[in-house]
Image: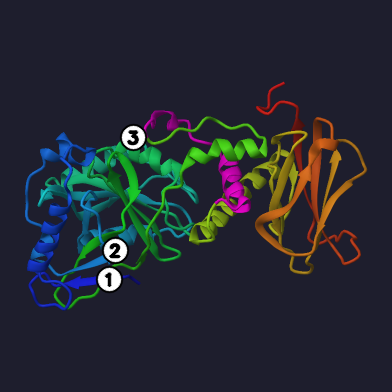
Amino acid sequence: MTTASKYSDGLGRNSAATSKDATAKDATFKEQRTTPPDTPEFSREIAQLPQRDSPLENHAYLEHGSELRPSQVRLILFPEAIDEIAAHAMSDMHSEVGGVLLGQAYRHLDMLYVDVRSALPVLSDDHGPIHFTFNADSWSDIHRERMQRHANLAIVGWFHTHPGLGVFFSGDDVVVQSAAFVLPWHTALVIDPVRARMTCFAWERGEMNGLPGFFEILSGLDSASRLPWRFQRGEIWNQSSIERLAAEQGVATRQSYGLNNPSPWLAVLGSALAILLSLALLVGGLLPLSSRNEALQNVVASLSDRTIQEANANGSAICPGGALQIYSPLPEERVTYGQEITLVGNAAADQTRFYRLDVRPSGEQTWWQLGSLRRRVHAGKFLTWDTASFAPGAYELRLAATNRAGDILAQPPPCVISFELSAAPDGTS
């Protein structure tokens, strides 16, 4: 499936734009840019690129998305590259996979163009449901294969998948881009093969931005798109909100940095912080109700389920099934006492829609009921708990399914996690 807002055969035989029209449109962009070419995208690296004619002038093409600004990269995907990207992207629908884009960067009518003519997959064991990494071995393999198969092409970007999570640029993706794909024309494709969506990102004035569109070269005048995905404008999830959100929740965080200082990003945030951010965004109303919220819910489920499984193994949680899960607070998390905290998780048993949340100091027998629910919840807010009446110390939190009278059901088994109310916001004594 694909979205095609414009079609051109590049030979003057179509209903949308002839090659002459396309050239005129590029000339219009050139006239609109009144500032001197001293911004990063017109830096010394770009000035050294060769001037070439655009393949849009003599090839059939589709334009996906909306019109680009003069300062944005004109990304052009060729059929061979699309087929290679698609084959690798759909080779694993459960874990992230990726690779590099090969092609040529050049200038045309004072604008930056990138032709992607081929793609090389990265075959690495260092990937999973929510991460994909270029390691030293994969880089060696990429450079060796590029020299053997495509010595005339350069690395012009990279691609990777987010199976079932949506198309966005995460903090980890920014790390990869800032460390390995730093040239002004280096682009990035993000694909969700489960939802059949794709998007693209590129540098613009020194920052990564989602491109509103790109071009696809067709293999013939009457051929259709080869893309198995629909284009969707992607967004970068800004990590500048981490400290504020975490402060509101009262838990320890590592310091976060913006794009202008990428090196500290190498200290990648742990799963707990990623879950906290996702949950805070979901329940805090800081994001509009959009496809991004749905993607966040999937991130929450993927990250939290893995954390709960690890906690089950080490004894800091007893949550046998997925119907009842506590995502916030996390097992073994230190939460600042005396503040209101949001309890979040899954309450989705098939046989009931009634649930209760209880707490007790570790080692004691009596549970104190915090509240009850009369609805099912998926990766969402249960209730807000004011901890002011509780002393610092180790506690257990229980989520249980009940009948209408409030009696706890044996099935599904309750979810119990251990955590700590800490006197110090940073988790220190």
Left-right relation of 398 to 425: right
Say above or below: 118 vs 314.
Answer: below
Left-right relation of 34 to 157: left
Left-right relation of 320 to 300: right
What amino acid is at disc 1? Ser
Magenta stretch: dominant secondary structure: helix
Percent position (x, y) of residue 218?
A: 18, 69
Q: Residues within 10 Å of mark 2 (few under 14, many from 20)?
A: some
Earlier in the chain: of badge 2 and badge 1, it is: 1
How are the colours assigned in the image?
rainbow
Closer to us: 295 or 156: 295
Q: Which residue is mark 2?
A: 66
Earlier in the chain: of badge 3 and badge 1, it is: 1
What amino acid is at disc 3? Ala
Left-right relation of 291 to 337: left
At mark 3, the secondary structure is: helix
Q: Residue at x 25, y 53 (%)?
A: 119
Q: Residues within 10 Å of mark 3 (few under 14, many from 20)?
A: few
Do residues under tags 2 and 1 come within 8 Å of each other at their CB atoms? yes
At mark 2, the secondary structure is: loop
State how far apart marks 3 and 2 are (Cα). Answer: 29 Å
- Select label 3 or label 2 by which is in front: 2
Numbered disc total = 3
Q: Residue at x 80, y 39 (%)?
A: 387
Q: Residue at x 16, y 78 (%)?
A: 15
Closer to us: 286 or 381: 286
Percent position (x, y) of residue 311?
A: 69, 42
Earlier in the chain: of badge 3 and badge 2, it is: 2
Q: Which residue is mark 1?
A: 5
Q: Which residue is mark 3?
A: 179
Q: Which residues are magenta?
A: 260-286
